[in-house]
Each structure stands twice: as structure tokens, then as C-alpha cells.
Image (tube, rainbow, N blue to C red):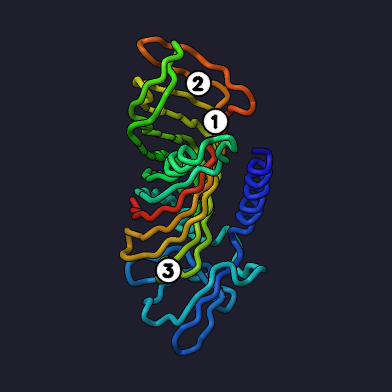
Amino acid sequence: MKKHILFMLIYTLLITLQNFNSYSQDLIITKLTDTINCKITRIQNEYIYFTFKYENEIRNTLINKNQVSTFKYNYFREPEIPDAFLPSQVEKTQIELLIYGGIGKRTAKLAENLPSNMKSYYRQLIKGQVYGIDLCYYINSKAGIGIKLSTFYSHNEISDVTFTNNYGNVISGNLSDKIFISYFGPYYGSRIILDPIRQVSINMNFGAGYIGYVDKGETYTNFVIKGNTFGMNVNAGLDFGITDKIRINLQVSAYSGVLKKVRLLKNSNYRIIELKEDEYEGLSKIDVNFGLKFLL
């Protein structure tokens, strides 16, 4: 847990420092091999809009994407154009909606004293499906704030399992678990645009929020276990543009959280259970997701 927090703090520092240099100058290289020292203000439809300096005069213009061989953001460290001369489009806000799904795996280790058949059962439960929604409001071309909602689901069941009930009687029955782990919280987002023409960019987010845990299961009787705790999330993704308003997103996410107490509902009885340290329920997991991002 401490390692996760330290990693996330270092990550936040790095992306914050990266955003201090928002107004370094960009480079455009045309297909005629002309180079342009400029500030790209926006890319819309078939055109790249930019501001440049020509004979001590600041000008705003545009160029068709078909005339451009390549271009790079923040290529020149020393800006040629003062910030005051840049048009407002550089700070143009943008809202992005990401809808995604994928697979996840919990990282907590299984207890060493589990029987082999139970280890196989619980190994299936630590892998599951993931789906979620991210909504981010970018305050400029690099930094934004957002909200994340993500759910992990896993299920497994086996029959003819032998149990000892509360009265010491040995009985047989089904064993099943349906586990839901939900995360909801704000995040700080950062992006690095690799290829504005093809709308290829790297996105990095860090956040903290609420983690909810639900296990709907059956041993020799039905039960529900619930819990909630504080959690942290960090993710890195890669966007590929397919239209001006839609992008394909590939994303890897890591979550960290631990349950120290749970609420158990069984046989119409409800009680709160304080877990011992060696019984803590680890909720940390790693997800790999695929999604569509919409620019609103």
C-alpha cells in the first residue's frame, strides 16, 4: 500500500512539472521541407491553426493537413511568441467522455493454508470483467480534471462442497460468489499529444475516491458481505483518432485499497465484523481496458 502511494505521489509531481512548460513553441514541417516555428492553437477538420512570427509581426493563420509532413509540440524550448500574443484557442476547454470495458485482476495474495481445490476456486474469482465511464474537462491542451466510475465483476461456483455449519453438523451444498468492486472519485488528468494530425496522444490520470465491495454468495446458506474504504487510482492510456470527435482508447489502470471491516448479512442476521490484520480484504487490482472516447 505504501509503495502504491509513493508511486502515485511521484507520478503526480512529474506530470505537474510537465505542465509548467505549456507554452514552449511547436514545429511544423511541410511536405516541401519548410520548417515553421509556431504555436499550434487548434486542429479542426482538415486544418491546423497556428500563430507564428514573421518579420517582427505576430500572425495567425492555418495550413491544410495534406500539406504537412509532420509536426511536434513543444519542440522549441525558448518561445519566439510572447504569451500575450497567443489567441484564446490555446486555452480552449474541451470535454471528453470515455466509455470502456476490459479485464481486471486483483493483486492480493491467496492464503497459503487454503486446500488446493479452494485455491483453484479463488484464483477464478481474482480475475473478472471491468466496465466504466470517465468524464474529463480539459482546462488547456495538457491538463484537466475529471470524474471516474469503474466496476469490477467476477463470479465462480462449484457444487457438492462439504461444510461444517454453526452447530457442528457436516453438510454438503453449493459454493458460489458474485463479487463487485466499484470505484468512484475525481482525478487530475494530463495528456501529451504525439501526433495532432492523427490525433494520437498519451493520457495519464491520478485520483483518489470511494471503493465499494459487495460479495453475494452461498455456502450452505445465502449471504451478503459489504464494505467500503478509501482508494487511489492511477492509469495511463493511448488515444488514436478515427474521426474529429471520436477516438479509440487503450488503457491500463491500477487501483489500491484495503478493507479492514465488513458488514455481513446471513440468515436474516446483520453484523459488523472487524477484520484482523491477516484477514484484511485487499482490493488492489490492475485493469486493461479498451474504449471509445467522445469529444463533446
Q: Earlier in the sequence, mark 3 or mark 2?
A: 3
Residue 129 appears in the picture as rendered: yes
For the residues marked 3 and 2, what is the alpha-carbon distance in whole angstroms? Answer: 56 Å
Residue 147, quarter of the rendered image: top left
For the residues marked 3 and 1, what is the alpha-carbon distance in whole angstroms? Answer: 52 Å
The residue located at (47%, 12%) in the rendering is 271
Residue identified by numbered label 2: 262
The residue located at (40%, 16%) in the rendering is 265
> Where is residue 242 drawn, in percent x and y?
32, 65
Q: Looking at the picture, does residue 167 appear above or below residue 95?
A: above
For the image, the number of numbered tags is: 3
> Where is residue 32 drawn, in percent x and y?
46, 89
Q: Earlier in the sequence, mark 3 or mark 1?
A: 3
Residues under numbered marks 3 and 2 in contact, where contact means CB atoms less than 8 Å apart: no
Given the current orientation, which residue lies at the most extreme bottom position?
A: 32
Q: Secondary structure at mark 2?
A: strand
Quarter placement of the N terminus: top right
Residue 63 shown left or right of residue 106 in the figure: left
Residue identified by numbered label 3: 49
Name the amino acid, label 2: Val
Front residue of 183 and 27: 183
Residues under numbered marks 1 and 2 in contact, where contact means CB atoms less than 8 Å apart: yes
Residue identified by numbered label 1: 281
> Where is residue 88 drawn, in percent x and y?
47, 55
Residue 49, quarter of the rendered image: bottom left
Q: Looking at the picture, does residue 18 appear above or below residue 130?
A: below
Q: Looking at the picture, does residue 268 appear above or below residue 280?
A: above
Residue 176 shown left or right of residue 275 in the figure: left
Q: Badge 3: how crowded within 10 Å, few (<14), some, or many (20+)?
A: some
Given the current orientation, which residue lies at the most extreme front position?
A: 170
